[in-house]
Image (cartoon, rainbow, N blue to C red):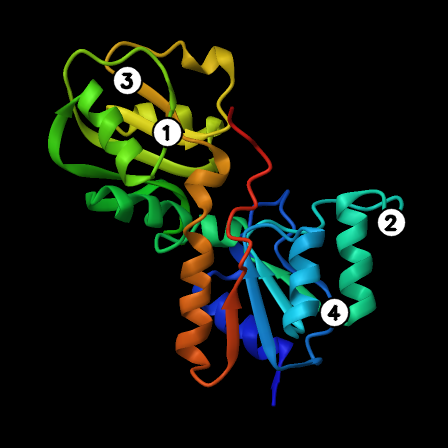
Amino acid sequence: MYKVKDIIAVLEDFAPLSIQEKWDNSGLCIGSPEAPVTSVLLGLDCTPELVGEAVSCGADMIVTHHPLIFSGLKKISPEDPVGAAVIKAVSAGIAVYAAHTTADKVIAGVSGAMASRLGLRDVSVLAPEADGNGLGVTGYLPEPLPAPDAVDYVKEKFSLKSVRASRPVRGKISKVALCGGAGASLIPDAIASGADLYITGDISYHHFFTPDGFMLMDIGHYESEKDIVAILFSLIKKNFPNFAVRMTENVNSNPIYYF
Protein backbone atom coordinates (compact mmCIF):
# COMPACT_ATOMS: atom_id res chain seq x y z
CA MET A 1 0.00 0.00 0.00
CA TYR A 2 1.20 3.49 -0.79
CA LYS A 3 1.63 6.26 1.75
CA VAL A 4 1.02 9.97 1.44
CA LYS A 5 4.78 10.53 1.34
CA ASP A 6 5.03 8.38 -1.81
CA ILE A 7 2.65 10.68 -3.69
CA ILE A 8 4.46 13.72 -2.31
CA ALA A 9 7.83 12.38 -3.50
CA VAL A 10 6.58 12.23 -7.10
CA LEU A 11 5.02 15.70 -6.90
CA GLU A 12 8.15 17.23 -5.40
CA ASP A 13 10.44 15.55 -7.90
CA PHE A 14 8.47 17.52 -10.51
CA ALA A 15 8.06 20.72 -8.46
CA PRO A 16 10.42 20.79 -5.44
CA LEU A 17 9.00 22.31 -2.27
CA SER A 18 12.27 24.19 -1.77
CA ILE A 19 11.57 26.53 -4.71
CA GLN A 20 8.25 27.90 -3.47
CA GLU A 21 7.94 31.63 -2.88
CA LYS A 22 8.62 32.76 0.70
CA TRP A 23 5.03 33.90 1.19
CA ASP A 24 3.55 30.66 -0.10
CA ASN A 25 2.23 27.61 1.77
CA SER A 26 2.74 24.79 -0.70
CA GLY A 27 3.14 21.26 0.63
CA LEU A 28 1.16 19.04 2.97
CA CYS A 29 -1.17 21.16 5.08
CA ILE A 30 -3.43 18.42 6.47
CA GLY A 31 -2.50 14.86 7.34
CA SER A 32 0.57 12.75 8.00
CA PRO A 33 3.17 11.74 5.39
CA GLU A 34 2.99 8.25 6.89
CA ALA A 35 -0.76 7.85 6.40
CA PRO A 36 -1.83 5.15 3.94
CA VAL A 37 -3.44 6.35 0.72
CA THR A 38 -5.53 4.33 -1.70
CA SER A 39 -6.99 7.08 -3.90
CA VAL A 40 -6.18 10.68 -4.83
CA LEU A 41 -8.53 13.40 -6.07
CA LEU A 42 -7.13 16.44 -7.90
CA GLY A 43 -8.57 19.93 -8.35
CA LEU A 44 -7.45 23.53 -8.67
CA ASP A 45 -8.96 24.74 -5.37
CA CYS A 46 -9.57 22.82 -2.15
CA THR A 47 -13.16 23.93 -1.64
CA PRO A 48 -15.68 22.30 0.74
CA GLU A 49 -17.31 20.88 -2.40
CA LEU A 50 -14.05 19.24 -3.47
CA VAL A 51 -13.58 17.69 -0.03
CA GLY A 52 -17.17 16.45 -0.15
CA GLU A 53 -16.44 14.89 -3.54
CA ALA A 54 -13.35 13.20 -2.09
CA VAL A 55 -15.49 11.71 0.68
CA SER A 56 -18.09 10.52 -1.84
CA CYS A 57 -15.58 8.83 -4.14
CA GLY A 58 -13.47 7.36 -1.35
CA ALA A 59 -10.33 9.44 -1.93
CA ASP A 60 -8.10 9.74 1.12
CA MET A 61 -5.79 12.39 -0.36
CA ILE A 62 -6.49 15.64 -2.19
CA VAL A 63 -3.92 17.40 -4.38
CA THR A 64 -4.62 20.95 -5.53
CA HIS A 65 -2.74 23.87 -7.03
CA HIS A 66 -3.98 26.53 -4.61
CA PRO A 67 -3.22 25.88 -0.92
CA LEU A 68 -6.21 25.38 1.35
CA ILE A 69 -4.42 27.31 4.11
CA PHE A 70 -2.42 30.37 3.02
CA SER A 71 -1.67 31.82 6.44
CA GLY A 72 -2.36 31.08 10.10
CA LEU A 73 -6.00 30.44 10.96
CA LYS A 74 -7.30 32.25 14.05
CA LYS A 75 -10.44 30.15 14.08
CA ILE A 76 -11.86 27.20 12.20
CA SER A 77 -15.56 27.70 11.56
CA PRO A 78 -17.96 25.80 9.30
CA GLU A 79 -19.36 29.18 8.32
CA ASP A 80 -16.11 30.01 6.51
CA PRO A 81 -15.23 28.14 3.28
CA VAL A 82 -11.66 27.43 4.40
CA GLY A 83 -12.81 26.36 7.85
CA ALA A 84 -15.52 24.14 6.38
CA ALA A 85 -13.01 22.43 4.08
CA VAL A 86 -10.55 21.90 6.95
CA ILE A 87 -13.23 20.42 9.18
CA LYS A 88 -14.47 18.08 6.45
CA ALA A 89 -10.96 16.91 5.54
CA VAL A 90 -9.85 16.30 9.12
CA SER A 91 -13.12 14.56 10.02
CA ALA A 92 -12.77 12.23 7.03
CA GLY A 93 -9.04 11.61 7.55
CA ILE A 94 -8.18 13.09 4.15
CA ALA A 95 -4.66 14.40 3.54
CA VAL A 96 -4.43 17.69 1.63
CA TYR A 97 -1.40 18.74 -0.44
CA ALA A 98 -0.85 21.82 -2.63
CA ALA A 99 1.66 22.41 -5.41
CA HIS A 100 1.28 26.16 -5.78
CA THR A 101 4.25 28.38 -6.60
CA THR A 102 6.31 25.21 -6.83
CA ALA A 103 4.30 24.32 -9.95
CA ASP A 104 4.39 27.95 -11.06
CA LYS A 105 8.18 28.04 -11.12
CA VAL A 106 9.00 24.91 -13.14
CA ILE A 107 8.91 25.41 -16.89
CA ALA A 108 6.72 22.33 -17.39
CA GLY A 109 4.18 23.73 -14.93
CA VAL A 110 1.52 26.44 -15.06
CA SER A 111 3.16 28.95 -17.39
CA GLY A 112 4.60 26.24 -19.61
CA ALA A 113 1.08 24.87 -20.06
CA MET A 114 -0.04 28.33 -21.18
CA ALA A 115 2.80 28.40 -23.70
CA SER A 116 1.72 24.99 -25.01
CA ARG A 117 -1.82 26.22 -25.58
CA LEU A 118 -0.47 29.04 -27.73
CA GLY A 119 2.05 26.83 -29.52
CA LEU A 120 4.94 29.10 -28.53
CA ARG A 121 8.44 28.38 -29.83
CA ASP A 122 11.77 28.79 -28.03
CA VAL A 123 10.15 28.85 -24.59
CA SER A 124 12.31 29.99 -21.67
CA VAL A 125 11.79 31.22 -18.10
CA LEU A 126 10.75 34.86 -17.82
CA ALA A 127 12.24 35.60 -14.40
CA PRO A 128 14.90 32.91 -13.86
CA GLU A 129 16.49 32.32 -10.48
CA ALA A 130 19.90 30.84 -9.72
CA ASP A 131 18.67 27.26 -10.07
CA GLY A 132 17.15 27.93 -13.50
CA ASN A 133 13.57 27.82 -12.27
CA GLY A 134 11.44 30.93 -11.97
CA LEU A 135 8.09 32.55 -12.55
CA GLY A 136 6.62 33.03 -16.02
CA VAL A 137 7.88 32.10 -19.47
CA THR A 138 8.54 33.78 -22.81
CA GLY A 139 8.29 32.42 -26.31
CA TYR A 140 7.38 33.23 -29.89
CA LEU A 141 4.04 32.80 -31.63
CA PRO A 142 4.01 30.36 -34.57
CA GLU A 143 3.80 33.47 -36.75
CA PRO A 144 3.65 37.20 -35.97
CA LEU A 145 0.10 38.55 -35.71
CA PRO A 146 -1.48 42.01 -35.70
CA ALA A 147 -2.87 42.83 -32.25
CA PRO A 148 -6.57 42.17 -33.13
CA ASP A 149 -5.65 38.77 -34.58
CA ALA A 150 -3.48 37.99 -31.55
CA VAL A 151 -6.44 38.75 -29.26
CA ASP A 152 -8.66 36.40 -31.27
CA TYR A 153 -5.94 33.74 -31.23
CA VAL A 154 -5.60 33.88 -27.43
CA LYS A 155 -9.37 33.78 -26.96
CA GLU A 156 -9.62 30.75 -29.22
CA LYS A 157 -6.77 28.81 -27.61
CA PHE A 158 -7.99 29.46 -24.05
CA SER A 159 -11.70 29.11 -24.92
CA LEU A 160 -12.48 32.63 -23.70
CA LYS A 161 -15.50 34.78 -24.45
CA SER A 162 -13.64 37.97 -23.54
CA VAL A 163 -10.33 39.32 -22.27
CA ARG A 164 -9.17 42.56 -20.67
CA ALA A 165 -6.35 44.26 -22.55
CA SER A 166 -4.39 47.48 -22.79
CA ARG A 167 -4.20 49.62 -25.90
CA PRO A 168 -3.30 47.36 -28.86
CA VAL A 169 0.22 47.74 -30.19
CA ARG A 170 0.54 49.11 -33.73
CA GLY A 171 2.96 46.52 -35.09
CA LYS A 172 2.71 42.75 -35.15
CA ILE A 173 3.02 40.64 -32.03
CA SER A 174 5.75 38.02 -32.11
CA LYS A 175 7.32 37.56 -28.67
CA VAL A 176 4.93 36.77 -25.83
CA ALA A 177 5.47 36.63 -22.08
CA LEU A 178 3.16 34.57 -19.88
CA CYS A 179 2.55 34.04 -16.18
CA GLY A 180 -0.30 32.03 -14.73
CA GLY A 181 -2.32 33.43 -11.86
CA ALA A 182 -1.64 36.92 -10.52
CA GLY A 183 1.32 38.18 -12.54
CA ALA A 184 1.29 41.96 -12.19
CA SER A 185 4.62 41.91 -10.34
CA LEU A 186 6.31 40.54 -13.46
CA ILE A 187 5.22 43.34 -15.81
CA PRO A 188 8.71 44.95 -15.61
CA ASP A 189 10.29 41.58 -16.42
CA ALA A 190 7.97 41.12 -19.39
CA ILE A 191 8.89 44.56 -20.73
CA ALA A 192 12.62 43.94 -20.15
CA SER A 193 12.37 40.61 -22.00
CA GLY A 194 11.36 42.42 -25.17
CA ALA A 195 7.92 40.83 -25.25
CA ASP A 196 5.31 42.53 -27.40
CA LEU A 197 2.51 41.03 -25.32
CA TYR A 198 2.27 39.88 -21.71
CA ILE A 199 -0.58 37.55 -20.75
CA THR A 200 -1.48 36.92 -17.11
CA GLY A 201 -4.32 37.42 -14.61
CA ASP A 202 -5.51 39.73 -11.81
CA ILE A 203 -4.32 42.97 -13.42
CA SER A 204 -5.48 46.23 -11.85
CA TYR A 205 -6.62 49.38 -13.65
CA HIS A 206 -3.40 51.40 -13.52
CA HIS A 207 -1.28 48.59 -14.93
CA PHE A 208 -3.11 48.94 -18.24
CA PHE A 209 -1.31 52.23 -18.92
CA THR A 210 1.46 50.54 -20.87
CA PRO A 211 4.49 51.93 -22.78
CA ASP A 212 4.47 52.09 -26.58
CA GLY A 213 5.13 48.74 -28.22
CA PHE A 214 3.98 46.70 -25.23
CA MET A 215 0.54 45.20 -24.73
CA LEU A 216 -0.93 43.69 -21.58
CA MET A 217 -3.71 41.09 -21.50
CA ASP A 218 -5.63 39.73 -18.51
CA ILE A 219 -7.27 36.39 -19.30
CA GLY A 220 -8.27 35.60 -15.71
CA HIS A 221 -6.59 33.87 -12.79
CA TYR A 222 -8.49 30.58 -13.08
CA GLU A 223 -8.35 30.54 -16.87
CA SER A 224 -4.56 30.86 -16.89
CA GLU A 225 -3.95 28.11 -14.33
CA LYS A 226 -6.56 25.41 -14.91
CA ASP A 227 -4.29 23.16 -17.04
CA ILE A 228 -2.06 22.37 -14.06
CA VAL A 229 -4.68 19.96 -12.71
CA ALA A 230 -4.35 17.68 -15.74
CA ILE A 231 -0.54 17.93 -15.55
CA LEU A 232 -0.48 16.80 -11.91
CA PHE A 233 -3.03 14.08 -12.68
CA SER A 234 -0.87 12.70 -15.51
CA LEU A 235 2.21 12.84 -13.28
CA ILE A 236 0.63 10.71 -10.56
CA LYS A 237 -1.04 8.35 -13.04
CA LYS A 238 2.25 7.75 -14.85
CA ASN A 239 4.11 6.89 -11.66
CA PHE A 240 1.29 4.89 -10.09
CA PRO A 241 -0.41 3.24 -13.11
CA ASN A 242 -2.57 0.87 -11.05
CA PHE A 243 -3.57 3.51 -8.51
CA ALA A 244 -6.99 5.17 -8.17
CA VAL A 245 -6.38 8.77 -9.20
CA ARG A 246 -9.02 11.08 -10.63
CA MET A 247 -9.67 14.70 -11.44
CA THR A 248 -12.65 16.45 -9.89
CA GLU A 249 -15.95 16.13 -11.71
CA ASN A 250 -16.68 19.70 -10.64
CA VAL A 251 -14.17 20.85 -13.25
CA ASN A 252 -14.82 24.57 -12.95
CA SER A 253 -14.05 25.90 -9.47
CA ASN A 254 -13.71 29.49 -10.70
CA PRO A 255 -15.26 31.77 -8.04
CA ILE A 256 -15.63 34.58 -10.60
CA TYR A 257 -18.81 34.67 -12.66
CA TYR A 258 -19.20 36.59 -15.92
CA PHE A 259 -22.60 38.00 -16.91
Q: Which residue is mark 3?
A: 214
How much space separates mark 2 and mark 4, taking CA atoms?
16 Å
Q: Position of residue 10 (x, y in %)?
A: 49, 73
The answer to which quarter of the image holds residue 176 is top left
View extreme (front): residue:
259
Relative to the observer, which residue lies in front, 73 or 45? 45
How much space separates mark 1 and mark 2, taking CA atoms?
38 Å
At a point 83% along the width and 67% down the height, the residue shown is: 91
Q: Residues within 10 Å of mark 2 (few under 14, many from 20)?
A: some
Closer to viewer: mark 3 or mark 4: 4
Q: Which residue is mark 2?
A: 76
- The tag on residue 161 is 1
**Sequence order check, earlier mark of 2 and 3:** 2
Q: Is residue 255 visible?
A: yes
Along the horizontal axis of the image, is 236 left or right of 96? left
How much space separates mark 1 and mark 4, taking CA atoms?
40 Å
At a point 74% along the width and 69% down the height, the residue shown is: 31
Q: Are marks 1 and 2 in contact (CB under 8 Å)?
A: no
SS at mark 1 in the image: loop
| Residue type beneath disc 2 | Ile
- The tag on residue 31 is 4
Q: Is residue 195 visible?
A: no
**Sequence order check, earlier mark of 3 and 1:** 1
Closer to viewer: mark 2 or mark 3: 2
**Sequence order check, earlier mark of 1 and 2:** 2
- The tag on residue 134 is none
How much space separates mark 3 and mark 1, taking CA atoms?
23 Å
The answer to which quarter of the image holds residue 57 is bottom right
